[in-house]
Amino acid sequence: MKVIQTIKSWFYPPVRNYGITESDIATKAASPSVTRQLEVVVSIATPTFKGISGNGGYRTFPYQYQDGSSACVAFTTAKIAMIVKSLIDTSTTLFSAGWFYTQRINTPAEGMNFDDLVNIAAQKGCLVDSMLPCFGYSENAMNTLLISQVDIIAAEQYKLPQNWIDIDNFDGGSFDAVASTIEITKKPVMLWFEFGAGEFFFTQYPQIVSSTNPWRHSTCAVDTTTIAGKQYIVIEESADSINFYRKFISKEFFIAKCILARYPITFVYNEVPNKPQFDGSVKSAQQCLQYLKFFPSNIACTGFWGKISTTACAKFQVANGITPALGNLGDITKASLIEKFNS
């Protein structure tokens, strides 16, 4: 069976890496809206690999097919938007990948950049698929989709968050972090893979059989499961047939082939009831900033000083006249925290 899959994949049209641009590979899809997973509580959780329902099952969603286009990133985002919305109103709303693809700044070049995608989904919104269907469209058909004023207005009704979390250390811990993110938040995770012939297509169980990775592809992780005692992340993708679009990613394949893992997050600034004390540590600084509503209340205070912490500290510095407000936890900032929380 593996030989047959390999032969088939040799003749499977190499659709220009399916839509991940070379600029994203060169910059690791750098985006001002991306921060690191280490600051999020789910990164330190232990996944069960029993699925979100907790009984070993897994979620499934409608099949969306990109066919000959290079719009895998757009199709992945359309599915992410559908799942995130379903968590709010329990609906199953298909969104148009064509909407994102026609809005990209690098048109008519193939594929689209991650930071461009984030801005489109957060600022222009997401358009329902029924208003701009693109199932099975070619690259040319995707590029010639016509956007009306009605589409523009309709898309503004639903927007994804501007901020995305980057699960960025690709080792066994990241496999567990992706799994726990899905299980705890129920949110989907965008996964990018590099792979070679016979590894990914025409199978539900991708396997490492090639030492080269000529193809790149964006997919959507939707759940976790355990099959025959082995743990998997369940993904759905848009370039394979309906029989194989749902795939089960093992830890081995993830470690060897995953090059990006991100998901959208909404920051919440609720009241933190108990006033902390500042003991000079990074973690206690985060707790103090969280109490003051500069640091999100739905983010764990882990002691890792990343983008979220830097932004929160800079806001604190501006509010207290500390210059330059660069978000560094220096002596002046520490003295101000001591004055506010230890006296």
Image (cartoon, helix red, strand yellow):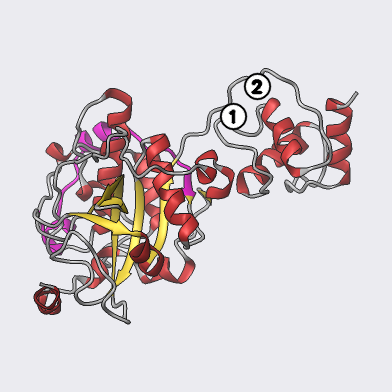
Q: Mark 2, residues whose alpha carbon is within 10 Å: few (<14), some, or many (≥20)?
A: some
85 vs 162, left or right, is: left
Q: Badges 2 and 1: C-beta atoms under 8 Å apart?
A: yes
Of labels 2 and 1, earlier in sequence is 2
118 vs 2, left or right, is: right
- The residues bearing labels 2 and 1 have C-alpha atoms spaced at a distance of 7 Å
Q: Which residue is pictured at 18% across the width and 38% down the height?
A: 94
The span shown in magenta is 136-165
Estimate the x, y position of residue 192 in percent, counting from the top left. 34, 61
- Is 114 situated above or below 319? below
Q: Which residue is pictured at 52% across the width and 46% down the height?
A: 43
Which residue does the numbered mark 2 point to in the structure image?
A: 272
Q: Amino acid at mark 2?
A: Val
Q: Nearer the viewer, residue 224 or 84?
A: 224
Which residue does the numbered mark 1 point to in the structure image?
A: 297
Figure quadrant of residue 68 = bottom left
**Local SS, label 1:** loop
Q: Nearer the viewer, residue 151 or 241?
A: 241
- Is 72 situated above or below 197? above
254 vs 319, left or right, is: left
Image quarter of the N terminus: bottom left
Estimate the x, y position of residue 52 in percent, counting from the top left. 32, 36
Q: Which residue is pictured at 25% across the width and 25% down the height?
A: 90
Q: Nearer the viewer, residue 17 or 237?
A: 237
Q: Which residue of the protein is positioned furthest toward the front in this rendering?
A: 229
